[in-house]
């Protein structure tokens, strides 16, 4: 799929026109109207103008080119792990992370208008959503098929009118496209949450007394024995908490890995500055992606 279903395209055209008229208020997101990223935008900036983009690259480009003031991009889910490709796109974007936001994901099984659960044989949705509902779909005996986006799946189901087909998406998507609500809370676990990052062209200024701060950075270790151990040792010796660590390979090489990490604290803090100096010594390169207010764990996953 390289375009939105007709029902979604109408909303996309209207939202894009509004955003184009006031780019300073535009907030880019990936997906069709009604996507969880759209929900995140509404929660982060209720006064903003959501700007739907077909891909993560398009959402990032909208900020780079000034068509939007900010992008809201998902990075990880508590049930299904890392969101594909984002770990590559963040370091390459040249944008700064200015905040984080957590969305409680409550999937709905959405049918064509007038459909009943007994009619449904196949379910379409984004692979992340299908993975988050894998056990429930199996119990219901429904065949899962990957689709480009959750909300676009809901729009396609509503537009085509085939009662044998259903989509997995948010309640918001079902309301926008007129789907039949067949099942609420379809996800396999109630703690299902997605973490989003807010991206802007300029870094966020953190005033004194901001509270707990999180910093995200990317680096590549040198191809040497115990390189990662040495690179991260400075965080341990300086008492800096490592909140997240992800690795990936790039360019077909298996000799050294690149890493994306979150730490608690700011480079302006002396312990963090010392840890970053040690990290740089043992790495080929280090790229700071942004420091921003940290969402407390009890709020992120109540």
Image (cartoon, helix red, strand yellow):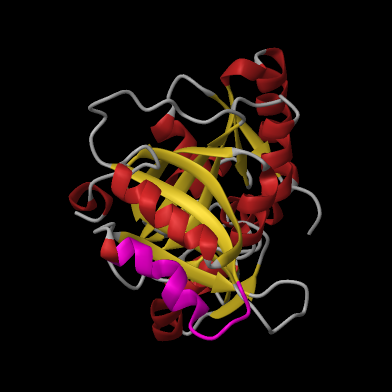
Q: Residue at left 77%, top 73%?
A: 251
In this rendering, is residue 289 above or below 284?
A: above
User: Is residue 136 visible to us here?
Assistant: yes
Residue 245 sits in which quadrant?
bottom left
Q: Is residue 230 magenta?
A: yes
- Which secondary structure dominates the residues rendered in magenta? helix
Residue 86 in the image: x percent, y percent?
60, 58
User: Is residue 124 visible to us here?
Assistant: no
Residue 285 in the image: x percent, y percent?
62, 58
In this rendering, is residue 297 above or below 41?
A: below
Q: Is residue 281 magenta?
A: no
Relative depth, front residue between 226 and 210: 226
Q: Residue at left 81%, top 54%?
A: 2
The residue stretch that appears in magenta:
222-236
Relative depth, front residue between 70 and 236: 236
Relative depth, front residue between 66 and 186: 66
Instruction: Please indicate whether residue 108 sits to the left or right of residue 73 in the image.
Output: left
Counting every numbered tag in the picture gives 0
Quarter of the image with the C terminus is bottom left
Q: Residue at left 24%, top 59%?
A: 239
Residue 10 in the image: x percent, y percent?
72, 33
């Amino acid at each position: 799929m390289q375009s939105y279903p007709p029902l979604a395209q109408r909303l996309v055209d209207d939202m894009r026109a509004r955003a184009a008229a006031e780019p300073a208020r535009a907030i880019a997101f990936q997906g069709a109207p009604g996507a969880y990223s759209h929900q995140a935008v509404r929660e982060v900036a209720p006064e903003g103008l959501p700007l739907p983009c077909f891909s993560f690259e398009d959402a990032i480009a909208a900020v780079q080119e000034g068509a939007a003031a900010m992008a809201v991009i998902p990075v990880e889910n508590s049930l299904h792990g890392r969101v594909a490709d984002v770990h590559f796109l963040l370091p390459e974007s040249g944008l700064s992370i200015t905040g984080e936001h957590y969305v409680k994901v409550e999937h709905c099984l959405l049918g064509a208008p007038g459909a009943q659960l007994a009619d449904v044989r196949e379910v379409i949705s984004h692979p992340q959503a299908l993975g988050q509902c894998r056990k429930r779909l199996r119990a219901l005996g429904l065949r899962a098929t990957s689709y480009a986006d959750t909300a676009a799946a809901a729009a396609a189901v509503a537009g085509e009118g085939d009662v044998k087909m259903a989509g997995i998406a948010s309640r918001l998507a079902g309301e926008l496209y007129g789907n039949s609500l067949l099942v609420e809370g379809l996800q396999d676990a109630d703690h299902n949450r997605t973490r989003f990052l807010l991206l802007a062209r300029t870094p966020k200024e953190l005033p004194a007394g901001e509270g707990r701060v999180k910093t995200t950075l990317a680096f590549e270790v040198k191809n040497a024995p115990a390189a990662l151990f040495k690179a991260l040792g400075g965080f341990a010796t300086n008492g800096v908490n490592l909140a997240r660590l992800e690795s990936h390979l790039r360019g077909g090489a298996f000799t050294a890995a690149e890493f994306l990490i979150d730490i608690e604290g700011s480079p302006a803090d002396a312990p963090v500055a010392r840890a970053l100096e040690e990290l740089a010594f043992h790495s080929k390169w280090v790229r700071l992606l942004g420091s921003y207010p940290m969402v407390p764990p009890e709020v992120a996953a109540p």
